[in-house]
Image (cartoon, rainbow, N blue to C red):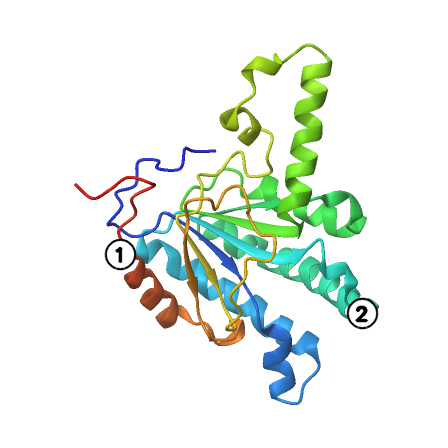
Amino acid sequence: MSSKTDDTDQRTGPRHVAIIMDGNGRWAQGQGKPRLFGHHAGVKRVKEIVRASPDHGVKYLTVFAFSTENWKRTQAEVSGLMKLFRRYIASEARDLLAEGVRVRFIGDRLQLDAKLRRVMDEIELLTSGNDRVHLTVALNYGGRDELGRATKRLAREVAEGRLSPDAVDETTLARFLDTCFLPDPDLVIRTSGEARISNFLLWQSAYAEYEFVNTLWPDFDATEFARVLAGYGKRERRFGAVPA
């Protein structure tokens, strides 16, 4: 993972955008439809935002698809979501490959269905040579869970003598995170009007800019995405320093 400042100029557009895609269920209920109807609409919106990203210089896009807390939802909704993820990954694999999108997943895969894990592995391998857009999907992901798993791996390295305790610092810990292959997010967007981060990229977003928008995720189109990115360009990111 990169340092908090990386090489992106503070007044240019964001290189890495992370999105908490909230509001699918409310969007569906507002139309008198079941919640899964909203999730289907939300998946289609992801495709639009992925395609729009290169036009705005967004190289890395990370989306929050399913949290470690989402298992608390009804069995019907959880089961429907898992089937939706599996079908979407399988059906979109070739298009994503052709469009230069590299797909990777973060989160704890052990609780996921074996069929879903298999298609996840397949699309990661299929698109591994792509570099136009890096799409990372957070699936069964939670920031605290990630930190717990990372700390356990780090502790094992220390216990086995492969890492000195004196060598452990924030850079060392970052190497054990799920996102070790990503730069830190420059901008985190949350849709649906909620103003909380919901355990998403807790470590990585320490210096990210946040944008909370009222639009429900299925209505968050490429035009609104462009508007939010334009607003980011007007912000001054100082990382604890003072203006020159």
Residue 163, quarter of the rendered image: top right
Rate crowding at label 2 as few (under 14), some (14 to 19) or many (20 or more) other CA atoms within 10 Å: few
Q: Residue pushed farthest bottom? A: 32
* Residue depicted at 69% across the width and 23% down the height: 155
* Residue depicted at 69% across the width and 37% down the height: 148
Instruction: Please tell me the numbered disc located at residue 233.
Output: 1
Image location (x, y in percent) of residue 102: 50, 45
- Number of disc labels: 2
Find numbered disc 2 in the image and state the secondary structure of the residue it sits on: loop
Residue 20, quarter of the rendered image: bottom right
Image location (x, y in percent) of residue 219: 48, 76
Q: Residue pushed farthest left? A: 244
* Residue depicted at 27% across the width and 55% down the height: 235
Could you tell me if residue 66 is visible in this image?
Answer: yes
Find numbered disc 1 in the image and state the secondary structure of the residue it sits on: loop
Q: Give the vertical position of 138 relative to 129 (above or below).
A: below
Check whether the beta carbons of the residues at disc 2 and disc 1 lie within 8 A of each other: no
Q: Look at mark 2 in the image and give the residue it sits on.
A: 74
Q: Give the vertical position of 38 relative to 14 (above or below).
A: below
Decide which of tag 2 and tag 1 comes sooner along the chain: 2
Q: Considering depth in this image, is 243 or 3 the residue closer to the camera?
A: 243
In the image, taking residue 179 as reference, residue 17 lies left or right, namely left
* Residue depicted at 30% across the width and 36% down the height: 7
Which amino acid, by three-letter code, is at mark 1? Answer: Gly
